[in-house]
Amino acid sequence: MISAPTSIAHLLTRKLADPKALYRAFEDSAWKDYTAAEIGHRAGRWQAAFCAAGIVESDRIAMCMRNGPSWVAIDMAVLGLGAAVVPLYVDDNPENIAYCADHSGAKILILDSGRQAKFLIATGKPLPRIIVMRVLPDEPYESAEKFLSAHEGDFNVRPIPAAQLATICYTSGTSGKPKGVMLSHANILADVASCEKLGIATAQMTFLSLLPLSHMFERTGGYYLPLAVGAKVIYTRGVPQLAEDLKQQPVTTMFVAPRVLERLHARIVQSLKEQGKLPLFNTLCDAAWRAQRGEGTLLDWLKLKILQPLVGKKIRMKIAPTLALLISGGAALSSAVARTFVGIGLPVLQGYGMTEAAPVLTVNRPEANDPESVGPAIPDVTLRIAEDGELLARGANVMIGYWNNPEATAKVIDAQGWLHTGDLAEVRDARYSIKGRKKDILVLSNGEKFSPQDAELAILGDPVFEQVMLIGEGKPFLTLACVSQSTEPKALAKLANAQLMSFPKWVKVRQVIVTQTAWTVDNGLLTPTLKVKRAEVLKHYAEEINAIYAEQSGDA
């Protein structure tokens, strides 16, 4: 019997003798496969170089790099030494990256390029020793090649307690400075073990890695879990090449954020409109949706038998011929988007979690999938709903606390060990539904309260809307801020309200602020995990918002 690992790095040591290629990446203009042994060799060189640089157990190494075999090798090297990894978002702004690297006390910061180093140094903030993976001839930075030169060594996993700090993950947050979530080896391994028990991941699968490995959703689900079961991971070349990679690579499984699925949904709907096949496709999706939820009639099954090969399968083959399973997390998925993928016969398992729980807490099961929920709790995790509707979680995957912030830790983990998620939830038949952030409840001036998330997801059901946020705290009516290629506010208000027919009569859009410029990480309106920064959107559109409510201050 194989004993339970005490270090995450043991996940790699157990695969070193496996001749199967576990990783594939596009390097030097060609796809290249790597075995666990080859990753182990790279990790061994990094360990030797780290030791020569004076890195000792419990030190921190920060990484701001795109996904790939080098990310895995460095991560395993650091964890094997008993040090901790501080993963940072490549697409985050330089000030945030510099803050997190300094706040964590990292001894070394590893970057992809000299361009990153230039921007970070320009912030004027304190920085650790910088190592750059790719240094151009005229750049003055220390290269990884130089750092690793003359260093060789076998990959080694030091004996450490499972409770030892493995990583500090900075939550992107929608306001204020990011907090460093401390996760131990035991926290992450517990979450991996719980996910493994679900049987969703198997050695026969091939995962496509798209979401950044600095996000715990991808790191646990798309890296540690496949490694634990011996599944292969292919690193996509990037978002612009995603469609091509899905067609060309034998991908079966992918962890995605809803934003990726929303874009695919919009492309599918637009193509079907142009072909005049949208009504037929909607009929297929409605039948498939009812069947998926166990509510299908004999007529629904007949429609599926006819329309799936006629419409659904053809769309699926164009998108990704081998893809069999999508796992969505990081934000809520609208039912309109979920219906599209159910319609083309591509299951989407929606889950829920947070960095503070390493991160998975719930996920739907393939054999009992309700895409309108985030599914039941995963094994060995206990959930309950507090009197005020907040979801609480307890399990071995719950974090140690926030780095150098005991006050913030005490606010989210109570004396009984319950993690207060800050999310409002409902449960039905053991399946949980997230109703929005506790702190994001909107209260109109007439006293009516509601969580905007459900309404925003409903509005996104019309693909004319790319991104949306409802505004109305303390106001007499709701205003919608949105990104859309349509520039007619009145028409957009009508379309939004058509999606809100099932909501209370006061959940209606009166005014619309529209832009064709997407909200992005670069312009400060999205977090690196692609969540809308509500406070920043309010600030960004403050002039328009003030004008709307000043003009109609007498309306009710």
Image (tube, helix red, strand yellow):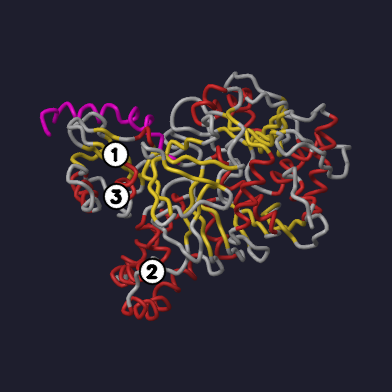
Q: Is residue 547 magenta?
A: yes
Tell me which label, 1 or 2, sits earlier in the chain. Answer: 2
- Residue 30 on image: x %, y %: 69, 57
Is residue 463 found left or right of 120 in the rendered image? left
Q: Mark 1 points at which residue?
A: 470
Q: Name the one closer to the observer, 390 or 100.
A: 390
Tell me which label, 3 or 2, sits earlier in the chain. Answer: 2
Q: Mark 3 points at which residue?
A: 459
Identify the amino acid type marked 2: Gly
Identify the element where label 2 is drawn: loop
Q: Mark 2 points at which residue?
A: 294
Marks 1/2: CA–CA distance: 33 Å
Is residue 203 found left or right of 18 in the rendered image? left
Q: Name the one closer to the observer, 158 or 428.
A: 428
Q: Do the numbered discs 3 and 1 sit on residues whose CB atoms are within 8 Å?
A: no
Q: Give the range drawn in magenta.
A: 531-556
- Residue 550 on image: x %, y %: 17, 26
Q: Name the one closer to the observer, 374 or 466.
A: 374
Of circles 3 and 2, which is in front?
2
The rendered magenta stretch, by its main secondary structure, is classed as helix
Q: How crowded is mark 3: few (under 14 residues within 10 Å), some or many (20 or more)?
A: many
Identify the element where label 1 is drawn: strand
Give the residue at the far left of this rendering. 554
Give the residue at the far front of this rendering. 416
Marks 3/1: CA–CA distance: 10 Å
**Residue 515 in view in this figure:** no
Q: Does the magenta stretch include residue 37?
A: no
